[in-house]
């Protein structure tokens, strides 16, 4: 396609917009629910807080690697672009096959349903409205993004402020409930006898909750001055997330205690209910709804850019690769991704799909970071606008951590891991069939 028939994206995202994408892509519903799982696998508040800090530092290692990759190749498509250049079309297609066509719409459907659950509960709608509301939320996000990245980022900025405000409210409530007595925050729970390796097992939900930082790289083609803005926004965004996660867990421990947090199924709601009753639970339900809505907005925007890049490469139908000449948005890709996600919401068939693609998502992180070694070797004499510090220690640390997560996931859920690998493998004959069909058309 020529530039005349397929316009390029416009670089409209500044540092704050880009940092908001990182914050919004990482903070979804996890921190409001998974903190109890981490506490359940630890024996003290000190261990719990340490895990959230360690998980943040490990994720930061990956973020710094993504910062260099984004600075080297500031184009829409993110990991798809890196894999295509370093390893070829087949690995890049397999990434797009599992992520843009399965994982992204599956996760959007799951989180949109979570949004609808909290939204309906907050305004008193019956459970029969959950699926229509979730589908409507996706349709609304797609419609807004039809008008370009600026419209989408403005909506995202609003919901990022709202979700950070919800976290700030939780911190204040936790401190108030503690009545100045913070000894239980770091106290050891002597009633808990944990098996060996439990501490490492508790790191898994922490790392999953830190996932989603890669969406900014999917949108790198629309970031202003990307060589400077991408590293800065990734660092600021993830740093802000780490602070939020540690503080909100401090609030949970201060208000509920370690035993109370470990026993809670909805710690955010329990914390608010303890001070404000049903009104507090309703308020935090609205906050969680805002948080999940913001995540869906980012996942749809980022996933559509991957689909559009694949279409422009000939890996999907040509129409998917088109960019609207007026609004500079991948409208067909947005419609495809959003439409498939709506089907999954209405059918309720997204749960297993997300479980099946978890290993594929983490494999994409490992191979994405591994391309950094190829770029360093292939362009050793080419100056890079940003270089990850402590190379090669940080990328090796991150890849090793990701592979450990994959192994632990396979041990814990062998069926899901096996299906994830099978879905990736199915992409191989699909790739060759697609290439053969293209040659026949030509």
Image: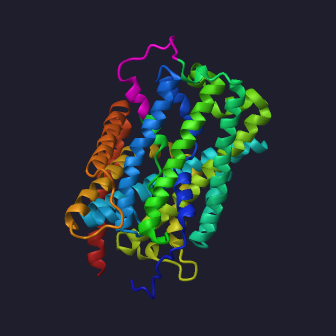
Frontmost residue, 393 versus 291: 393
Q: Is residue 431 visible?
A: no
Depth check: give the residue in front, 361 or 65: 65
- Location of residue 400 by image quarter: top left
**In magenta segment, residue 200:** yes
Where 241 falls versus 232 (above or below)? above
Q: Position of residue 422 (x, y in %)?
A: 31, 47
Q: Of residues 89 and 61, which is closer to you in this image?
A: 61
- The part of the image, by quadrant, that contains residue 279 is top right
**Residue 355: within the magenta?**
no
Give the percent coordinates (x, y) of residue 318: 41, 76
Name the quadrant containing residue 55: top left
Q: From the viewer's perspective, is 54 left or right of 86?
A: right
Q: Quadrant of the N terminus?
A: bottom left
Toward the bottom, the furthest residue is 4
Please give the name of the residue rendered at 68% of the width and 30% of the height, measured from the top-left corner: 175
Residue 420 is left or right of residue 379, and the answer is right
Q: Tell me: 378 left or right of 421.
A: left
Look at the magenta stretch and give its main secondary structure: loop
Q: Is residue 92 visible?
A: yes
Q: Which percent across, then down, holds residue 328?
A: 53, 77
Where 441 falls versus 271 (above or below)? Answer: below
Residue at position x 54%, y 37% in the image: 246
- Where does the magenta region start and end? 188-203
For the point 73% across and 27% down, which residue is it?
Answer: 274
């Amino acid at each position: 396609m020529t530039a005349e028939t397929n316009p390029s994206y416009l670089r409209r995202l500044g540092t704050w917009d880009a940092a908001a994408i990182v914050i919004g892509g990482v903070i979804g519903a996890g921190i409001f629910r998974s903190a109890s799982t981490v506490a359940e696998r630890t024996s003290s508040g000190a261990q719990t807080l340490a895990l959230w800090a360690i998980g943040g530092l490990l994720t930061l290692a990956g973020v710094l690697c993504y910062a260099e990759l984004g600075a080297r190749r500031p184009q829409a498509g993110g990991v798809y672009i890196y894999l295509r250049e370093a390893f070829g079309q087949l690995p890049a297609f397999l990434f797009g096959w599992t992520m843009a066509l399965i994982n992204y719409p599956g996760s959007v459907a799951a989180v949109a349903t979570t949004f609808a659950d909290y939204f309906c509960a907050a305004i008193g709608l019956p459970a029969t409205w959950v699926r229509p509301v979730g589908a409507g939320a996706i349709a609304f996000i797609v419609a807004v993004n039809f008008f370009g990245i600026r419209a989408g980022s403005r909506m995202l900025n609003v919901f990022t402020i709202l979700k950070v405000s919800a976290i700030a409210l939780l911190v204040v409530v936790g401190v108030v409930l503690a009545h100045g007595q913070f000894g239980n925050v770091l106290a050891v729970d002597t009633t808990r006898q944990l098996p060996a390796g439990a501490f490492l097992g508790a790191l898994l939900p922490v790392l999953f909750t830190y996932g989603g930082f890669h969406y900014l790289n999917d949108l790198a083609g629309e970031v202003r001055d990307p060589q400077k803005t991408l590293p800065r926004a990734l660092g600021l965004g993830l740093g802000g997330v780490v602070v939020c996660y540690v503080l909100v867990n401090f609030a949970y421990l201060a208000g509920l205690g370690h035993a109370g947090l470990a026993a809670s199924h909805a710690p955010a709601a329990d914390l608010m209910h303890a001070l404000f009753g049903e009104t507090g639970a309703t308020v935090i339900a609205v906050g969680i709804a805002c948080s999940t809505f913001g995540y869906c907005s980012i996942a749809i925007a980022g996933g559509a850019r991957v689909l559009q890049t694949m279409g422009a490469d000939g890996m999907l139908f040509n129409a998917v690769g088109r960019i609207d000449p007026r609004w500079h948005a991948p409208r067909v890709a947005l419609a495809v991704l959003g439409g498939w996600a709506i089907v999954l919401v209405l059918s309720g068939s997204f749960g297993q799909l997300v479980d099946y693609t978890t290993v594929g998502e983490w494999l994409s992180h490992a191979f994405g970071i591994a391309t950094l070694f190829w770029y360093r070797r292939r362009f050793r004499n080419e100056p890079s606008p940003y270089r990850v510090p402590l190379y090669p220690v940080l990328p090796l640390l991150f890849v090793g951590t990701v592979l450990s997560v994959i192994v632990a996931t396979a041990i814990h859920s062998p069926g899901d891991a096996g299906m994830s690998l099978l879905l990736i493998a199915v992409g191989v004959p699909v790739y060759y069939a697609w290439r053969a069909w293209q040659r026949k058309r030509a």
